[in-house]
Image (tube, rainbow, N blue to C red):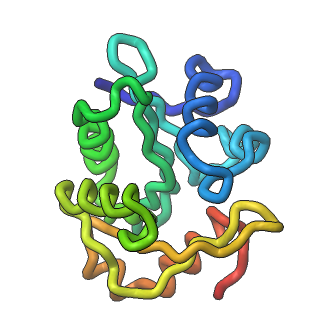
């Protein structure tokens, strides 16, 4: 398994990756297709990584590369390949790509069965819930804030620097001010 950076919506695998992105995440939890295409190669801190096996797209991870941490915005595996530990391998690739703490958002366990599963998945990979109240800003002007958990593989760092980390995510990822 390997990953390659997608720098443009004209790159090989870009259209296939974008379709997987749009099909995997609900509108409330992702950029519009147009906004996502604009991010590719134009936003210096945004890295879109196609994950390949035998030159075929099997998944992706998107991250924002900040000075003190990396925000893992989205991770997905092609539907027919789910349940075969590819997600674990993708997270492992993401972890190996940086020495900085990884930070991600996840639905609350009490809000959905999938949220509980994702939390357990990330727990198995060494991530812990950060004990703070966090809401995801909307991706669209008419959207709503969504209560979520932040998780990290370095919970002490994130807890200590929570306000700064939240402000950086809000400003860069969601293009909104502080809450």
Q: Residue 177's spot in the image, x, y percent?
A: 71, 80
In this rendering, the count of numbered labels is: 0
Residue 156's place in the image compared with 74, above or below, is below
Q: Is residue 8 above or below residue 134?
A: above
State the residue at coordinates (49%, 63%). 66
Tell me if residue 131 can be seen: yes
Q: Residue at x 25, y 54 (%)?
A: 121
In the rendered image, residue 72, in percent from the top left (x then y), is placed at 44, 55
Quarter assignment of residue 22: top right
Nearer the observer, 92 or 88: 88
Across and down, in percent, residue 24 comes to 54, 40
Q: Front-most of 163 and 27?
A: 27
Q: Position of residue 112 (x, y in %)?
A: 43, 63
In the displayed structure, does residue 175 sit left or right of residue 169?
A: right
Q: Quadrant of residue 142?
A: bottom right
Quarter of the picture containing the C terminus is bottom right
Q: Please name whichever residue, 2 or 68, is drawn nearer the observer in this view of the structure.
A: 2
With 35 as the anchor, is 100 left or right in this view?
Answer: left
Write the residue at 70% across / 22% down: 10
Would residue 170 be visible to someone looking at this image?
no
- Residue sitting at 43 percent across and 29 percent down? 79
Q: Quadrant of the N terminus?
A: top left
Q: Residue furthest top?
A: 54
Outermost residue on the right side: it is: 142
């Amino acid at each position: 398994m390997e990953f390659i950076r997608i720098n443009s919506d004209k790159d090989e695998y870009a259209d296939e990756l974008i379709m997987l992105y749009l099909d995997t995440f609900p509108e409330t939890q992702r950029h519009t297709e147009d906004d996502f295409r604009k991010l590719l190669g134009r936003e210096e801190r945004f890295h879109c990584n196609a994950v390949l096996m035998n030159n075929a797209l099997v998944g992706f991870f998107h991250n924002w590369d900040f000075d003190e941490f990396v925000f893992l915005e989205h991770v997905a595996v092609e539907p027919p390949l789910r349940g075969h530990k590819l997600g674990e391998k993708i997270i492992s690739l993401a972890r190996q790509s940086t020495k900085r703490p990884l930070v991600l958002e996840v639905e609350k366990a009490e809000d959905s069965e999938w949220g509980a599963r994702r939390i357990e998945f990330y727990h198995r990979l060494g991530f812990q819930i950060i004990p703070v109240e966090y809401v995801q800003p909307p991706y669209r002007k008419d959207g709503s804030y969504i209560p979520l958990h932040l998780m990290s593989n370095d919970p002490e760092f994130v807890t200590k620097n929570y306000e700064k980390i939240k402000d950086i995510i809000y400003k860069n990822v969601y293009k909104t001010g502080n809450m």
